[in-house]
Image (spheres, rainbow, N blue to C red):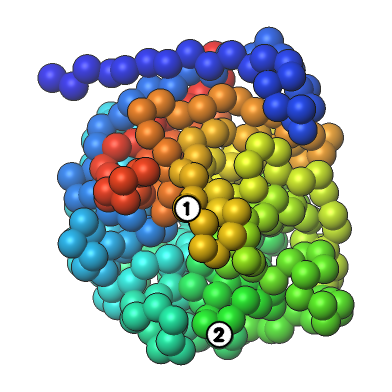
Amino acid sequence: MKIAKYWILSIVTGMFVACEMSNPDVQYTITQCASIPSPRASATSFVIDNYAYVFGGRDSEGNYLNDLWKYDPQKDIWESLGITPLQSRVNATSCVCDGVAYIGLGFNGLYYNSTGYLTDWWSYDPINNQWKQLSNFPGNTTDRAISMVGDGELYIGYGFCYTYERDMYRYEIMSDTWEFIDVHLDRNPLTFPVRSFGGIGASCQGRHFAGTGFRTHSLNWWGEFLPEGKWLKRKSVPGHKRTIATCTATETYIYIIGGIHWGGINTTGEILNDIQQYNPLTNNWVHVGNLPNRGFMNHIAFSVDKRVFVGLGENENMQVCDDLYCIYEK
């Protein structure tokens, strides 16, 4: 028998000076869910029809994976869907449009060289458990690329390929074609939005947001991406600056969870466990609270209805984890 564990988090005004508490009386409950039978870090996740799917990553021995798991939040059970036709990899990107998942990119080589960066792009139909290979991603920023979903099109980019980049591409689903988006950025790599590694992105309320990452040190920038090719500054992510965090969106909010805070390349990082909530309508942040037990990096997050799930990844001791938590408003 699985015994659920609960934690109550109260939003307290002034918990972070940088936060604007839009609703200081809201309480959130955190429930520990069933652990995935196959622990992993640096995986990717997506949700279709209220089921979550987890693809790839690496196990505790450092082996790259290419299997797919399905999670039923209602029954709190995991199901293995077996090996996929994709190569094993870490740091793939995935997104969902009209009930179909789009997955690809990532990395399956040795770091600090120019090989191992994958450009393949696939669709996945969960009803028929069917994979289809699509046109390859034309860019080279494939490691930890961000993905955002528009009306019949996807926005992919801002990944890493031996160098820090901020290129963005539009993928037209119907025509299976890619288009480079010229955003007319300043050549200075440190101007907004900063060229960086390990950033995050999400779409919410028909708008697209991205930020954080690493470039000599962790970053807390946050911006809105306009499909015509513009970035607009938004309020910075509160709390610690961070990279390799994760984020997910409900219908109303974007949640950023955990990551690692690095003060510089040669410094020891601090693994984070905080939950930051962003409201696109008000451009305000709320610190919801902290996850129990451990910090989170190279982890996953996904949302089903108003519930946010986060877990797997690595803890402060660099151990690959299998635990999963559900965060929901009371």
Q: Which mark is residue 268?
A: 1
Q: Which residue is at a point 42% across and 38% down the rendered structure image?
A: 295
Residue 146 in percent (x, y) is at 58, 64
Q: Relative to 34, does residue 106 appear above or below in the rendering?
A: below
Residue 37 in percent (x, y) is at 18, 45
Reading the image, the residue beneath label 2 is 140
Q: Nearer the viewer, residue 207 or 275?
A: 275
Helix, strand or loop at disc 2?
A: loop
Callout count: 2
Q: Is residue 4 left or right of residue 192?
A: left
Crowd band around label 1 with a 10 angstrom C-alpha radius: few (<14), some (14–19), many (20+): few
Q: Is residue 153 left or right of residue 88?
A: right
Quarter of the image where one finds residue 141: bottom right
Image quadrant occupied by the N terminus:
top left
Quarter of the image where one finds residue 111: bottom left
The answer to whether one can see residue 184 in this image is yes
Image quadrant occupied by the C terminus:
top right
Quarter of the image where one finds residue 210: bottom right
Give, as a three-letter code, the residue at label 1: Thr
